[in-house]
Image (cartoon, rainbow, N blue to C red):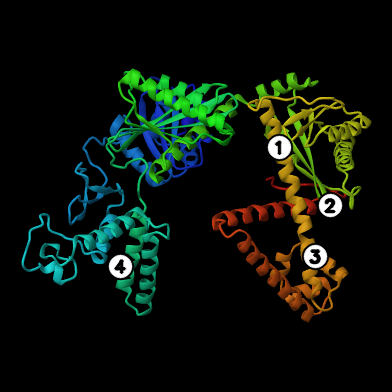
């Protein structure tokens, strides 16, 4: 059935389809509503955009067509994982009973693991939550994994099995087969037993509690070693059991859910995202240990974050929606806490908000920025949802108002729909390069990004001359080829660079506007001006220009670093007997960086660089040694740096290098090239 040909298809089909294709590429829950704003369907997805787009991708069954016919809007809630999405979906279906979902009012719930609140606790699977200070882990959709995990725990930590603990003279069978430590016969002390319980809790929570590698990870490594040993000894049944145990731990350990936590205290998590005068507030509500949903509120305000929060809370809570016991808020962003005066003022706002709660509702909820990992994780989800909604708002609105603001603030001759930005990067006159960034309607137009390897300023430091060369080469070519010229040229610099660019543009007969953005005070300079133009830090127009300026700087610096990286290794190559400065330069010209030299075979090096195989082996060995020394130096200089962050920086650097290499490979005139693929 082709859903585009269904009779009575909703008028807002295009809007629904656009919503689906613009959905976040993250795990979460999606909610369909009808024309009366009632929830008619709740679903979950590993990737929201992919799942929602599938509803509009051609022939569909009758159920899907019916849903689309009656749907009027789609909402998404971003969560941390597909597991969280499954749990939230289950909660929302039971709460709202959507007409097109399976009826879940039979009370069926996912199992949890319970550790009882006793002197000698028991551990077992259950579907019922009892508020008796027992500790619960889960819920877990994978019941088989729960059983496997409990079986493993029983072997590793033989806790008591009997429902009622009675003193006995002789232990039962479980003690003799190693499945119980017989607290009933005083075979183990309360303290030692409690130590075993703590390790079980650490295993289920996925953390060792001492900052080291998690208990789950350590156990997985141990079991993996046992599995390989069993397989090597041809004990395949044993190896299969160990494999299943590893999978169960991976499925369950660390499954401390952000959407179900069994804490009966009422809590609200309030996060927000701000861009200019636009702010989106997100509220995640936890009631009875379950997340009951997410609410989004869009506002326009020029106030700071604390003041906006105070205004929002005073309008959000009312007699029909009283505040819960706890309200967790996100840490204000850096720009809101520039100085102690602002921080103190914000704290006063929070105190006055607490007083307002007391006057309106007779009690003061505890308002705080959480330190616990669990609450921080929920707030992170809430902020992610706020950021996603803010992105949609900015996209829906477009850059039009910001561009109109620039016309007025800078007295431009036209609306700057096409902005091109220039930046120069060099080191003591070596490897001077210019980057050219192009934006269309406030959005990067990456196919028009360009690099310029400058020639007129090699060996000297002259930013004005460098700017004149880059601007002349760019626009003399566009004029010669009859291509579109920009409405505004933005220079990363002050009045000197702006006047240099303006002089070249006048020589070429261009009528485009030009301005400079000086980073120190974020001042805007116009040609031949005596004083700069200063816009509000919240100005949307200024944010567009900052985006352009920062992009040009990033783009130019990346290429400059790649070009000069080879210089640092010339002495390494020259240390090889028979390799002088000219030969070292020739090798670097062929391979471009020391990593490529280290990866090349001696035969390839000898052939491409016209050296003997013996010299080639020595060159490659020197390159490998240099890389090892460089890695060791980085560790010594920054021992606290995270491995993940360093690897991420490495990937980004590699990407920049790769793109720059492609840019020069594609040059169609000397020093002028297009970056393939964008950044």
Which residue in the protein does label 4 denote?
241
Q: Can the viewer see residue 618?
A: yes
**Mark 4: secondary structure:** helix
If you read the primary sequence from the N terminus, does the residue marked by circle 1 or circle 3 appear first? 1
**Alpha carbon separation for disc pair 3 and 4:** 55 Å
**Alpha carbon separation for disc pair 1 and 3:** 33 Å
If you read the primary sequence from the N terminus, does the residue marked by circle 2 or circle 3 appear first? 2
The residue under the point 34% across, 18% down is 360
**Alpha carbon separation for disc pair 2 and 4:** 65 Å
* Residues at discs 2 and 4 in contact (Cβ within 8 Å): no
- Is 353 positioned to the left or the right of 553 in the image? left
Q: Looking at the rendering, which quadrant does residue 658 occupy?
A: bottom right
Which residue in the protein does label 2 denote?
428
x, y percentage for residue 235?
32, 76
Q: Looking at the rendering, which quadrant does residue 234 occupy?
A: bottom left
If you read the primary sequence from the N terminus, does the residue marked by circle 4 or circle 1 appear first? 4
* Residues at discs 2 and 3 in contact (Cβ within 8 Å): no
User: How many residues crowd around disc 2 within 10 Å: few (fewer than 14), some, or many (20 or more)?
Assistant: few
- Is 601 positioned to the left or the right of 391 in the image? right
- Look at discs 2 and 3 and give the one toward the viewer: 2
**Mark 1: secondary structure:** loop
Residue projecting furthest to the left = 169
**Alpha carbon separation for disc pair 2 and 3:** 21 Å
Q: Which mark is residue 445?
A: 1
């Amino acid at each position: 059935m082709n859903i585009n040909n269904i009779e009575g298809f909703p008028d807002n089909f295009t809007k629904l389809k656009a919503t689906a294709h613009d959905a976040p590429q993250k795990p979460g829950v999606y909610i369909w509503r009808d024309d009366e704003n009632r929830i008619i369907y709740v679903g979950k997805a590993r990737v929201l955009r992919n799942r929602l787009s599938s509803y509009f991708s051609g022939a569909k069954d009758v159920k899907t067509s019916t849903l689309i016919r009656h749907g009027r809007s789609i909402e998404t809630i971003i969560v941390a994982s597909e597991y969280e999405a499954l749990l939230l979906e289950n909660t929302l279906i039971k709460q709202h009973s959507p007409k097109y979902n399976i009826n879940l009012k039979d009370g069926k719930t996912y199992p949890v693991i319970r550790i009882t609140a006793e002197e000698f606790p028991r551990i077992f699977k259950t579907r019922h939550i009892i508020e008796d200070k027992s500790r619960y882990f889960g819920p877990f959709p994978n019941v088989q994994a729960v059983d496997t995990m409990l079986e493993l725990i029983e072997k590793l930590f033989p806790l008591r099995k009997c429902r009622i603990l009675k003193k006995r003279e002789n232990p039962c069978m479980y003690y003799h087969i190693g499945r119980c430590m017989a607290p009933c016969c005083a075979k183990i002390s309360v303290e030692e037993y409690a130590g075993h319980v703590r390790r079980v809790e650490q295993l289920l929570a996925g953390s060792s509690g001492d900052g080291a590698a998690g208990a789950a990870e350590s156990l997985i490594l141990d079991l993996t070693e046992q599995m390989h040993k069993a397989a090597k000894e041809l004990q395949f049944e044993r190896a299969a059991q160990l494999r299943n145990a590893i999978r169960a731990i991976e499925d369950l350990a660390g499954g401390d859910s952000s959407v179900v936590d069994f804490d009966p205290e009422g809590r609200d998590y309030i996060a927000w995202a701000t861009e200019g005068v636009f702010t989106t507030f997100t509220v995640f509500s936890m009631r009875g240990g379950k997340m009951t949903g997410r609410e989004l509120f869009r506002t326009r305000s020029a106030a700071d974050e604390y003041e906006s929060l105070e205004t929002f809370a005073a309008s959000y809570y009312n007699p029909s929606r009283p505040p819960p016991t706890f309200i967790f808020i996100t840490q204000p962003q850096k720009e809101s806490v520039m100085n102690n005066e602002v921080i103190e003022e914000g704290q006063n706002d929070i105190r006055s908000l607490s007083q307002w709660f007391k006057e309106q509702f007779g009690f003061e909820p505890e308002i705080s920025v959480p330190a616990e990992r669990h609450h921080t994780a929920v707030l992170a989800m809430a902020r992610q949802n706020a950021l996603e909604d803010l992105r949609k708002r900015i996209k829906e609105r477009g850059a039009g108002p910001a561009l109109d603001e620039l016309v007025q603030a800078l007295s431009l001759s036209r609306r700057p729909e096409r902005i091109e930005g220039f930046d120069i990067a060099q080191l003591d006159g070596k490897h001077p390069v210019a980057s050219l960034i192009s934006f269309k309607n406030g959005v990067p137009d990456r196919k028009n990004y360009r690099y310029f390897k400058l020639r007129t300023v090699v060996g000297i430091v002259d930013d004005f001359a460098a700017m004149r060369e880059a601007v002349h080469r760019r626009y003399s070519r566009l004029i010669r080829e009859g291509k579109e010229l920009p409405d505004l040229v933005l220079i990363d610099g002050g009045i000197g660079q702006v006047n240099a660019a303006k002089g070249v543009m006048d020589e070429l007969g261009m009528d485009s506007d030009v301005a400079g953005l000086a980073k120190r005070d974020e001042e805007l300079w116009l040609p031949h001006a005596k004083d700069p133009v200063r816009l509000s830090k919240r100005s949307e127009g200024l944010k567009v220009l900052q985006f352009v300026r920062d992009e040009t700087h990033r783009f130019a610096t990346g290429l400059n670093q790649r070009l000069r990286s080879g210089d640092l290794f010339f002495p390494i190559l020259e240390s090889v007997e028979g390799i002088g400065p000219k030969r070292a330069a020739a090798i670097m010209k062929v391979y471009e960086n020391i990593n490529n030299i280290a990866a090349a075979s001696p035969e390839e090096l000898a052939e491409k660089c016209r050296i003997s195989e013996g010299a080639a082996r020595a060159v490659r060995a020197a390159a490998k040694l240099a890389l090892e020394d460089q890695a060791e130096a980085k560790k010594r200089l920054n021992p606290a740096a995270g491995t993940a962050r360093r690897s991420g920086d490495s990937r980004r650097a590699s990407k920049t290098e790769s793109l720059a290499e492609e840019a020069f490979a594609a040059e169609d005139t000397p020093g002028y090239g297009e970056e393939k693929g964008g950044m």
